[in-house]
Amino acid sequence: MNQMPVIDSHHHFWDLDKFEYPWMGEGSPLAVTSGPDRLRPLIEASAVDYTVIVQAAQSVEETLWLLEIAGETDFVAGVVGWVDLKDPNVGETLDELQQNRYFKGVRHIWEGEEDPSWLYTSGALNGLKEIEARGLCYDFLVRPPNLQYVPKIMDEVPRLRSVIDHIAKPLIKDGVMEPWLSDMRKIASINGMRCKVSGMVTEADHENWTAEDLRPYVHHILGMFGHDRLMFGTDWPVCTLAASYEQVTETARDLLSSLRPNEKEAVFGGTARSFYRLDV
């Protein structure tokens, strides 16, 4: 039996000459064009086989660029892109994107919207219904204030193939659990909802974090979702604000070291492969 490939379910590429990334902020150390040539040696050193690129700019043009990269890069297995969820013709855009075999799903930078209820109240549900109808995936990029709206959204689109990014970015630096924990318990009870074990180091103290700061949160996530609904991701290059690619992967392996071999295979590859329907 072949061993399950290791899949980084969440990273980014960006080109500052092509697209704008206002969320970075002026003078950000992240403001360096980052593509496959930068990532390849990092995944090879960390024994990662395949990756999923996730959108970082709110534009269909960026999605098309990421799909082009996927077609030219042997380790990229899928792309989570962006569409205007409020566009009445969003279905036509999705139909066009789906002609590319690397297009797996959609994400919107919900955490960046001023109104924490935006995805539920803005008219974006129209787009989520189109995503649901096509069997595509949706990544929830959320922070704790957004979480109360996720069950309400899922009531409207119960068959939407969904995942919570970055364990919903709890306030790890301050050791805060509530209301994140209670809200995540409700979300974990939603049939089929998944969660990415990613994006944690940047919610901790960038200079002084340790695996022990993350461990209580991972413990709760594992208890709520189980190994078969979790997927590993690095959130590279965002993670470099606090840790290297290798540090993130090794920390995840440490935090999940108590799992049985088949359970580790699920978190580090199997869940992402089945959720995004990756051809690997």
Image (cartoon, rainbow, N blue to C red):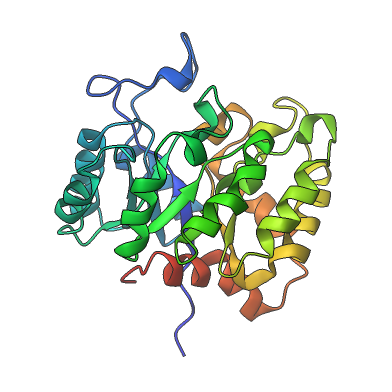
Coordinates of residue 94 in the picture (x, y in percent): 22, 51
Q: Nearer the viewer, residue 18 or 106?
A: 106
**275, above or below 179, in the image:** below
Q: Residue furthest top?
A: 26
Q: Is residue 236 visible?
A: no
Above or below, 180 relative to 1: above
Where is residue 136, by image quadrant?
bottom left
Give the image location of residue 213, x and y in percent: 82, 41
Q: How many marks?
A: 0
Q: Position of residue 57 (x, y in %)?
A: 34, 30
141 on left or right of 209: left
238 or 227, nearer to the observer: 227
Which residue is found at the position 54% from the left and 46% from the top?
234
Q: Which quadrant holds the C terminus?
A: bottom left
Q: Position of residue 38 (x, y in %)?
A: 37, 37
Q: Is residue 236 left or right of residue 252?
A: left
Evaluate whether residue 255 shows in this view. yes
Q: Which residue is pictured at 14% across the width and 52% down the height?
A: 96
| Quarter of the rendering containing residue 252 | bottom right
Q: Nearer the viewer, residue 176 or 44?
A: 176
Q: Is residue 161 left or right of residue 149?
A: left
x 33%, y 31%: residue? 58
Question: Which residue is found at the position 71% from the left and 78% from the top?
Answer: 260
